[in-house]
Image (tube, helix red, strand yellow):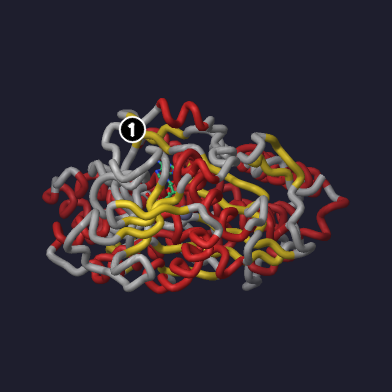
């Protein structure tokens, strides 16, 4: 069948065909590093990861570019409010670059814990200002800009295709003027390409430019950096669904205005939101959940990944600790099934489970091949990880599939799912403790995590002590609590 993707541009599932055979240029909007990523943001990056893995498995060489926004992103995507980075730096009594460095590192630590593959190129906005200035100059030369009140604006009326991605209509845009309107704008949906003195007198990071000393608007950075690394037209651009009406709409307008080439990007992939019981999760409103908060509550980051891939990326996903607990149980049963298969291998010896990872091609004419084929079709069908996961379960539950085939099939599926099955199984296989004891220890560790979270340190210490009396030593690591016999 080949990979089919839902393209927001046109709102249809389409066969994926790259502009140059065999290679894919992919740009996924990265984080604004003024705070930790919340678990909703992380859903976007898991989606990008599944997409990249699916493309690579389909045989494409993928260049995955991710930006780091460390300047110019205001609290409203429509040029409203404060600069997120500057505000955060002020609150923390640090410089903007210190804040950026700290949260960038925390972000990549989260990606690693979620088993997300590192992008091919990671690029910081502050290191690409001259690319942005060059692109803005081109937009200006083509007559799409005006200067007012010290800022350079993009004039959306000069770009007739404005809003196509989001199916916006220009008449509606005028009528739907927003509350805090920048009076310099001719149309409320015009947007800033370059800010100078008008917005913040004391902006920490500024650069010289043909329009005066200042700093770039947020949207221009994604256009400039993606064009720089992927060329003036490329294959796939992704981000959360919230980016459709403003950020991605503006990226398209300015990129196509500068180069005159349409479409700038052929496929637009957007993930739906992760929502809390209370509604939308947002970094700027505070009170959000981080990956670390899940770890502190006794969960493994991969439990969260398991929860995410249990839903389709284009459906809204409701987060609750109850759902996370089911995911934890689900992943645990999955690992138990895998370990059963490991034990049932004819001669386990010291053979590394890694050896099974490349055995999948041999499976296609055997029973396991049925599951693998169904798995591949699910992923090719707009990245249906929930159906893929069901095929993995089917494979592991089928008594007619020999253990070696089941392992080879499961590990092959895991190239997409990213649950780290082979390594996790290897780790657990190495443990000489009886299964019941391992389960009891893990239950106590989870209980201790919950106690710590609710600041019941006496109970947490008591659990540590109980385990110590049984000769079990706990070690708290950023990735979770490890245990060993002391
Ligand atoms: P930001 O750091 O705010 O620029 O957001 C990073 C990414 O997370 C973007 O692709 C957003 O569209 C996406 N995003 C933000 N909130 C959520 C959420 N609650 N669920 C899923 N994706 C989100
Ligand atoms: Zn972007």
Vertical side of 105 occupied by 316: above or below: above
Q: Is residue 140 left or right of residue 11?
A: left
Q: Is residue 264 left or right of residue 183?
A: right
Q: Classify the position of the N terminus by image quarter.
A: top right
Q: Position of residue 308 (x, y in %)?
A: 49, 43
Between 84 and 44, the one nearer to me in the picture: 84
Q: Position of residue 448 (x, y in %)?
A: 24, 49
Q: Position of residue 97 (x, y in %)?
A: 27, 70
- Inspect this view and state whether residue 49 appears: no
Between 367 and 439, the one nearer to me in the picture: 367
Residue labelled with disc 1: 178
- Which corner quadrant of the image does residue 486 belong to? bottom left
**Badge 1 residue CB within 8 Å of ligand 1:** no
Mark 1 nearby-residue class (10 Å; few <14, some 14–19, many ≥20): few
Helix, strand or loop at label 1? It is: loop
Vertical side of 52 occupied by 11: above or below: above
Vertical side of 282 occupied by 107: above or below: below
């Amino acid at each position: 069948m080949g990979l089919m993707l839902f393209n927001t541009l046109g709102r249809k599932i389409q066969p994926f065909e790259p502009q140059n055979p065999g290679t894919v240029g992919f740009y996924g909007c990265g984080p604004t590093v003024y705070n930790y990523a919340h678990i909703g943001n992380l859903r976007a990056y898991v989606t990008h990861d599944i997409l990249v893995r699916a493309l690579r498995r389909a045989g494409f060489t993928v260049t995955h570019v991710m930006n780091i926004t460390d300047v110019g992103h205001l609290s409203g995507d429509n040029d409203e409010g404060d600069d997120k980075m500057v505000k955060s730096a002020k609150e923390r009594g640090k410089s903007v670059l210190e804040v950026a460095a700290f949260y960038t590192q925390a972000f990549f630590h989260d990606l690693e814990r979620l088993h997300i593959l590192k992008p091919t190129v990671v690029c910081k906005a502050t290191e690409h200002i001259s690319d942005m200035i060059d692109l803005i100059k081109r937009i200006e030369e083509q007559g799409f800009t005006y200067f007012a009140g010290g800022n350079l604006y993009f004039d959306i009326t000069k770009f007739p295709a404005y809003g196509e991605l989001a199916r916006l209509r220009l008449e509606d845009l005028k009528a739907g003027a927003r509350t805090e309107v920048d009076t310099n704008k001719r149309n409320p949906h015009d947007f800033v390409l370059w800010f100078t003195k008008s917005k913040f007198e004391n902006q920490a990071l500024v650069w010289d430019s043909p329009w005066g000393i200042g700093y770039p608007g947020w949207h221009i950075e994604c256009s400039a950096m993606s064009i720089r690394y992927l060329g003036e037209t490329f294959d796939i651009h992704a981000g959360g669904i919230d980016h459709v009406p403003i950020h991605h709409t503006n990226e398209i307008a300015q990129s196509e205005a500068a180069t005159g080439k349409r479409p700038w990007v052929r496929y637009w992939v957007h993930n739906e939101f992760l929502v809390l019981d209370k509604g939308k999760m947002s970094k700027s409103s505070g009170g959000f959940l981080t990956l670390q908060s899940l770890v502190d509550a006794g969960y493994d980051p991969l439990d969260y990944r398991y929860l995410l891939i249990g839903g389709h990326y284009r459906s809204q996903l409701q987060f609750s600790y109850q759902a996370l607990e089911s995911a934890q149980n689900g992943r645990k049963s999955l690992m138990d099934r895998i370990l059963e298969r490991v034990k049932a291998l004819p001669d386990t010896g010291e053979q590394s489970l890694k050896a099974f990872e490349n055995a999948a091609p041999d499976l296609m004419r055997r029973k396991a091949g049925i599951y693998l084929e169904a798995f591949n079709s699910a992923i090719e069908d707009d990245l249906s990880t929930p159906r893929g996961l069901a095929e993995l379960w089917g494979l592991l539950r089928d008594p007619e599939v020999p253990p070696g085939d089941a392992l080879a099939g499961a590990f092959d599926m895991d190239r997409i799912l990213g649950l780290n099955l082979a390594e996790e199984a290897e780790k657990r296989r190495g443990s000489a403790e009886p299964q019941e004891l391992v389960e009891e220890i893990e239950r106590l560790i989870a209980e201790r995590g919950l106690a710590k979270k609710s600041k019941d340190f006496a109970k947490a210490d008591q659990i540590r002590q109980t385990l110590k009396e049984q000769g079990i030593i706990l070690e708290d690591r950023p990735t979770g609590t490890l245990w060993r016999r002391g």
